């Protein structure tokens, strides 16, 4: 069983419960969860109000189950959390959970894998196309923008990113074109934040990016992908600050749509990364 880091944060405990249930493919009962909480300092005193802590965890997991959509990774019946999937078939979801629980320290190539996962989620959401331009990538950013302008049939602006610019805050760009080789289409600029300090990232500056490619402000939208599922009281601020937010639940919904094809080499890389982190 994975070590429980803290009993002071409902989100942390809920991540821990998800990880254990899905990765080990084992149900988690109320008595087992309370036993683990007690081993980590939980006491049924005035601070918790008897079953209040457990009830809060179940409430959080129920909310998440709803956010995951019609095919959630687990069920909750009679106070038992039961896996509905095998992690080996949904390793991208586990990758997000690992980042959410432990953060991005010592991520190695995990952040690059998360960018590729975010690319697929954005592409499926738009029912369109997406490319990853995040650092590191083949070619400099100016060269990537030249190619992108051609793909989008948008005019390449005169300004180039600074020579030392890596990705200038954008990791994935998605779009949904009309297929008529004309300008004017929905474009999403996404930054990917696998770690816990995603809220310290600078917002994407559309005013700067419009100097690289002459796309229209009205049809260009900022976005961010994160690995957490945010508490309700933090969601509105995240959307107001970063635009369309793809949290773990939205990534799950978009990633595992019917007929979605995930590149086998990407899946192998994600499986190996998760297996190394959890074994």
Image (cartoon, rainbow, N blue to C red):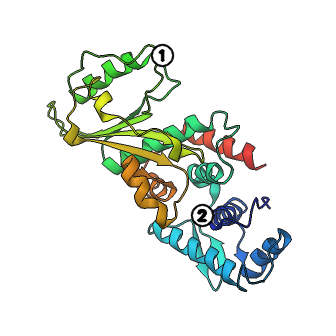
Q: Residue at x 81, y 79 (%)?
A: 43
Rendered-image quadrant of the N terminus: bottom right
Q: Are the residues flagged by discs 2 and 1 in contact, CB closer than 8 Å?
A: no
Is 124 drawn above or below residue 9 in the view shown? above
Residue 256 picture location, percent across and down: 46, 55
Read off the residue under disc 1: 164
User: Would you say 248 lies left or right of 196 here?
Assistant: left
User: Would you say 60 lies left or right of 260 here?
Assistant: right
Residue 278 picture location, percent across and down: 75, 50
Secondary structure at numbered mark 1: loop
Q: Which quadrant would residue 218 be assigned to in this image? A: top left
Q: Is residue 68 visible?
A: no
Q: Which of marks 2 and 1 is in front?
A: 1
Secondary structure at numbered mark 2: loop
Residue 240 picture location, percent across and down: 37, 53
**Most foreground residue, 52 or 106:** 52
Going by the picture, which residue comes out furthest to the front?
A: 46
Is 199 drawn above or below residue 252 in the view shown? above
Residue 10 picture location, percent across and down: 64, 68
Going by the picture, which residue comes out furthest to the top?
A: 163
User: Would you say 140 lies left or right of 107 here?
Assistant: left
Q: Which residue is drawn at 20% across and 35% down?
A: 216
Residue 85's mark? Answer: 2
Q: Which of marks 2 and 1 is nearer the N terminus?
A: 2
Q: Disc count in the image?
A: 2
**Most foreground residue, 217 or 95:** 217
Q: Residue at x 61, y 48 (%)?
A: 95
Is 76 drawn above or below residue 174 in the view shown? below
């Amino acid at each position: 069983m994975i070590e429980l880091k803290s009993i002071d944060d409902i989100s942390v405990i809920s991540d821990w419960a998800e990880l254990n249930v899905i990765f080990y493919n084992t149900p988690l009962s109320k008595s087992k969860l309370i036993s683990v909480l007690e081993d980590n300092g939980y006491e049924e005193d005035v601070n918790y109000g008897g079953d209040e802590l457990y009830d809060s965890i179940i409430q959080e997991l129920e909310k998440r189950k709803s956010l995951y959509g019609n095919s959630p990774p687990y069920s909750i019946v009679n106070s038992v959390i039961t896996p509905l999937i095998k992690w080996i078939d949904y390793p991208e979801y586990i990758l997000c959970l690992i980042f959410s629980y432990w953060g991005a320290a010592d991520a190695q190539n995990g952040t690059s894998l998360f960018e590729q996962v975010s690319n697929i989620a954005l592409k499926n959401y738009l029912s369109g196309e997406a490319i990853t331009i995040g650092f590191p990538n083949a070619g400099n950013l100016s060269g990537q923008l030249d190619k992108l302008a051609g793909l989008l049939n948008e005019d390449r602006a005169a300004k180039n990113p600074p020579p030392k610019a890596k990705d200038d805050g954008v990791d994935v760009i998605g779009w949904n074109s009309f297929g008529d080789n004309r300008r004017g289409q929905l474009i999403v600029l996404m930054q990917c934040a696998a770690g816990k300090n995603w809220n310290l990232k600078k917002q994407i500056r559309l005013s700067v990016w419009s100097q690289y490619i002459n796309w229209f402000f009205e049809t260009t939208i900022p976005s961010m992908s994160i690995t957490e599922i945010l508490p309700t009281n933090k969601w509105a601020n995240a959307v107001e600050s970063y635009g369309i937010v793809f949290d773990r639940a939205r990534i799950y919904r978009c990633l595992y749509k019917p007929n979605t094809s995930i590149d086998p080499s990407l899946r192998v890389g994600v499986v190996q990364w998760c297996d190394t982190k959890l074994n």
